[in-house]
Structure formats: structure tokens, C-alpha cells
Image: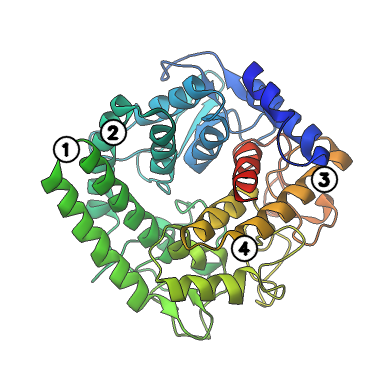
Amino acid sequence: MRNLKQQVFAMGKPEWRSMLEYTVELHRKCTREPEPPFSYPWEEIGTGYCFGPAFGHIDLTHATLDTLRYQPIHAKNQLLNYLSLQTADGLIPGCIWFRGGDVKWSTAKGHPPFWPVAVQDFHDLYEDFDLIRSAYLALVRQIGWFETNRKADNEGYYYIDLWKKVWESGVDDGIRYDNITPGPYACVDATAHVYQMYVYAAKWANLLDLPAESGKWQIRAKQLAEFIRGALFDEETALFHDSWSVGQPHSRRLTFEGMWPMMVGAATAEQANRVIDENLLNPDRFFTAHPVPTIALEDPAFELRMWRGPSWNSITYWVARGCTLYGRNDAALAILERAIDHTAVKFAETGTLWEFYHPHGGLQAELQRKPYTAFNQPCREYMGHNPMIAMTDLWASLN
């Protein structure tokens, strides 16, 4: 991690330096030697993760984005480790658990497919066509898995959390799934994520000189964008919602998932700007001391509990990237700077990075994780949701 440590000294504000140096050290601490099923050294989610050691899920993408500019071999190895686990039907598992000498993962549920963003960022930096070829084949298979197993009625896609609270969406105890009748309904997050998969499939097919395949993926991406824009946007809230709650005041919630169409570029410019101005930069909703809370402050369901109010740096990063797609660098800068500032303050106070943060800047001890379990505080030494180097790089590029 020598190159990464050297780069930290030139990054961001001076008051961020100690926190960024710790981030580098945590990457090192989380990296383990190769062992089955991995051919390369692998980075665990976080040495303080209460269910660790574990690898994968959306955390893997965040850790990869954090290192790809400074430790490209390490970053690429994480992606190769990850894609090697894909099953014949196209499923890429969520978390891979290492417990008591055993390695386990679920073959019954997937997880949000963030990883193509890291592959594309890697290719943009290094023009690695070998990685693109491997990733394209994996992406096409994973699209097939979503089409076969997560297609909603009429249009869109869902996560299995609609039926079973197994948190395939990555949002444990997600409030959108409270008090609903199970059914194959379009989820705003799943539909946006699959849209993004089609966008990258089209882009990679074009890079690999497969114009017919690229055209096919482009057509499907356009169909999904039209559905998202027309069926999932709520004029009253200026957010996107699930198909069962859009336009339904009694059931809709003001959650960060309603920003996903903006984050992946599926929203119209007008819709994206309304999401940003009326929600993201609204201090009564998401523009808190540490943005972005997972539920808007004015939503009566807001509480200081995991995914029901606290802020996650990884989500703030995705929201900021989404803002840049629509030329809203002002919004991206505002939320990034606040989030990094507050993370650095909490690091100075506690000496660690946390799984999630107090949206009002209060004490971490005020936050709950899962009150019905033995682990009811946010985890310390948590790498997977803290792409602090990637956040700082993005902040610097926008200044």
C-alpha cells in the first residue's frame, strides 16, 4: 500500500489527512492471503464487521473503487475473485463468509449489481480489454439471472425482500418493505440497477466490436428508462418510488432508494434536478450535517437505526456520482465535503471508521444497528461502506 500512503499526503484538506491515512492502513489490515475459493489476495469487508471475516456484496465495489487508482493490481484481483464465484445460472452471490474454517455463501439470493461501475472505471484508467471481455460475459449471464428470477409483472425488477426479509437489496430492515402484500412488483432500486447493467452491457459490447449485441442492450436500456421515468416518478415528492407506492401518500416513503434513477442516469434532466433540489439539498429531507440520511428527516418513520435514518458514506458517494451525470457538481461537492468533514471529526474523536454515521453529527453511541440482535451498534473498522479515498478523489476533481 506504499503508493496509496504517499498519495494521501496530497489529498483533500489537511484535517482529513489522519483519517485518510487510517483508511489506507485499514485496507492493508483487511487484505488476506489467497485461500479457496480465491486465487488472489482478498479484502474482507472490515476487520470490525460483527459477522466477519467476509468478502463481497456491494462492499466489494466500494473497496475496489477506493484502491483502483493507486493499487490497480489489488483492485483488479478483487474483481476477479468476485466474478470467479458466479454460478452456471448467472447468479453472483452476496457475502462470502469465512467461519471456523468453513466457507459459505447463499446460492438462493443475489445482491445489487454495483460491480460493473468499478470495472468500467478500471478500464477508463488502464484500457484493460481482457477484464472487459471477462466482465462482459459475466454481466450477460447475470442479466439473464435477473430476467429469469427477478422480473416484475408488466415491467421492472424486484428484490426478493418483497417476500422474504433476507435483505437481497442490501438495505437490511428496509422500511419500504414494511406492511406490504408480497408480489412481483417493480422495486425502484432493483429496476434502476438492472437498467445500469444494460447500459454497461451495451457499452462493453461496443468496446468488443459486437454492434448487434450492443444495439440489443441499448434498446432494453431505453425501454427501462422510459418505464422508470413514466411509472415510478412521483410529482408530489419529487422522488422515484416503488410501483406499489408511487402516488400513494399512505404507503410511500421518502428514502434514499428514490434517488437511484438519478444515480444511474435513468431520470430525465428535469426529474434529476427536482430530486437534487427538492430532496438532496433540502435540509428538511436529506441535506443533514452528515449527508445522506437513508430516510428523509421529515418522514415520520425516521429513526437513528440502521438503514432507517443514519448516513452511509458509500451511499453519499453514489449520490454524488449521480449528481455529476447531470452537471450538478455543486450538489456533489456540497454533500461530499460535509460527509468527509464529519467522518474526519468522528475519526478524531473515536480513532476508527464506522459502518454508518449519525446524520446530525451526534454521538455514534446514539445509533442502533439491529436492536433484536446482540449487535446493536454500528461496526467499527468498517472498510466496505467507507470509500473515503474515492470520495476525496471525486471531491478534488470537482473543485
Instruction: Kindly identify the residue that appears in the image at 62 percent across and 62 percent down.
Output: 330
The tag earlier along the polypeptide, 1 or 4, is 1
Front residue of 19 and 85 = 19
Residue under label 3, please give it: 346
The tag earlier along the polypeptide, 2 or 1, is 2
Q: Indicate which label's residue lies in the foreground, 2 or 1.
A: 1
Q: Amino acid at mark 4?
A: Ala
| Percent position of residue 130, x then y | 29, 25
Mark 1 closeness class: few <14, some 14–19, many ≥20 residues within 10 Å: few
Numbered mark located on residue 87 in the image? 2
Q: Quadrant of residue 352?
A: top right
| Percent position of residue 39, x then y | 41, 15
Q: Indicate which label's residue lies in the foreground, 2 or 4.
A: 4
Label 3 SS: helix
On screen, residue 74 versus residue 382, left or right, reads: left
- Quadrant where the N terminus sits is top right
Q: Amino acid at mark 3?
A: Lys
Instruction: Kindly identify the residue that appears in the image at 42 percent across and 47 percent down.
Output: 111
Q: Amino acid at mark 1?
A: Asp
| Percent position of residue 209, x then y | 16, 37
| Percent position of residue 6, x then y | 69, 22
The tag earlier along the polypeptide, 3 or 4, is 4
Q: Are marks 3 and 1 in contact (CB under 8 Å)?
A: no
Cα–Cα gap, marks 3 and 1? 48 Å
Numbered mark located on residue 209 in the image? 1
Cα–Cα gap, marks 2 and 1? 26 Å
Label 4 SS: helix
Q: How many marks?
A: 4
Q: Is residue 92 visible?
A: yes
The tag earlier along the polypeptide, 3 or 1, is 1
Residue under label 4, please give it: 331
